[in-house]
Amino acid sequence: MNVVPVHIHFFEKDRYSGYQEDFIKILDKCLVQRAVIFGNEEADETTAACLIAFKKKFPARIFGIPEINIKEKTALKKMHDYVKKNQMSGIKIFPSKCLCYPDNKKMFGLYKKALDLKVPLVFHSGRVPGDMQKYGLVKYAQPIALDEVAGRFPQLQILISHAGNPMFEQTLMIGNRKNIHLDLCGVTGVWRDKFPLLFERFGAQRLLHGGPNHYHGKYLQENIIRMQELLSAAKLSEEEKSMIMGKNAIRIFNLEKD
């Protein structure tokens, strides 16, 4: 089975000398050929510069999704450069940090740009984590705000991080939008009881194996095991498991183009 963990972050404490090589060793140990790493622009997080450097060193193994600040005047240029010059595989938007609803018409230029670049957009949705609670507002990260976006831009591939945790009801409400996909980061833990509903609504073809969020070797191994156990408990077919564990990520992020 081709396993592709989606939604991994490297915090400052993880970025010691040689961390990139160590991470590749962990991937090898887990029999994982590719990993999709999400960026955040806080200084102690996985900045775009970190992603670009990692991609250059291991172009066939690492696939980056840098975050952009949608209010920056250079947002469109950054999107273009990240994808065309630095081979990034998508763009991440964090509405609760930018204090802007995804269905705000001021955002539509970004969606048109993503379509031009032929890359998916990842939206952090759901709760505001950690220190971001000091300035972030969860109301902007409600999954329901992506309903109009998906409807107006049906060719735009949208990935909702954490499946909208804990606002799963809103996520389920917009499951009729066929261009909306979910990463299951965090769903293997206390929210595992939500998986049957998510699977029923979105099907195997629109669910992606969410990585362990915070990078640590043992977390990645444990995360893969927990996800496989969750899928087995749900009595999914081998093909359905394969889609969720890796095939969907390869297709949505176009990982085989390299």
Image (cartoon, grey):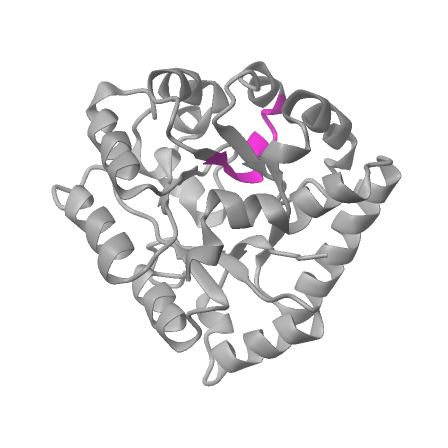
**Place of residue 215 in the rendered image (x, y in percent of width and height, measured from the top left):** 57, 64
Name the one closer to the observer, 169 or 250.
250
Q: Residue at x 41, y 58 (%)?
A: 64
Residue shown at the point (49%, 72%) measured from the top left: 13
Look at the image and tell me in which quarter the C terminus lies: bottom left
Residue 75 vs 65, above or below: the answer is: above
- The quadrant of the image that shows the N terminus is bottom right
Residue 71's quadrant in the figure?
top left
Give 38 or 82, whichever is nearer the viewer.
Answer: 82
Left or right relative to 1: residue 235: right
Name which residue lies at 83% across and 48% down. 229
- Tell me which corner region of the image, top left, top right, bottom left or bottom right, holds residue 212: bottom right
Vertical comparison of 227 with 22: above or below: above
Count of marks overlaid on the render: 0
Give the residue drawn at x 40%, y 31%. 137
**Residue farthest to the front, as pictured:** 257
The one of 168 and 178 positioned closer to us in this rendering: 178
- Measured as percent of width and height from the top left, residue 99 is found at 31, 31
The percent coordinates of residue 102 (x first, y second) are 34, 26
Q: Is residue 177 visible?
A: yes
Residue 70 on image: x %, y %:
24, 38
Residue 4 counted in the magenta span: no
Residue located farthest toward the bottom when viewing the structure as drawn: 17
Residue 167 is covered by the magenta coloring: yes
Rendered view: 246 above or below 165? below
Residue 165 showing in the rendered view? no
130 vs 212, nearest the viewer? 212
Q: Is residue 161 above or below residue 22?
A: above
Tell me the magenta residue range: 159-168
In the image, taking residue 18 as reference, residue 154 lies left or right, namely left
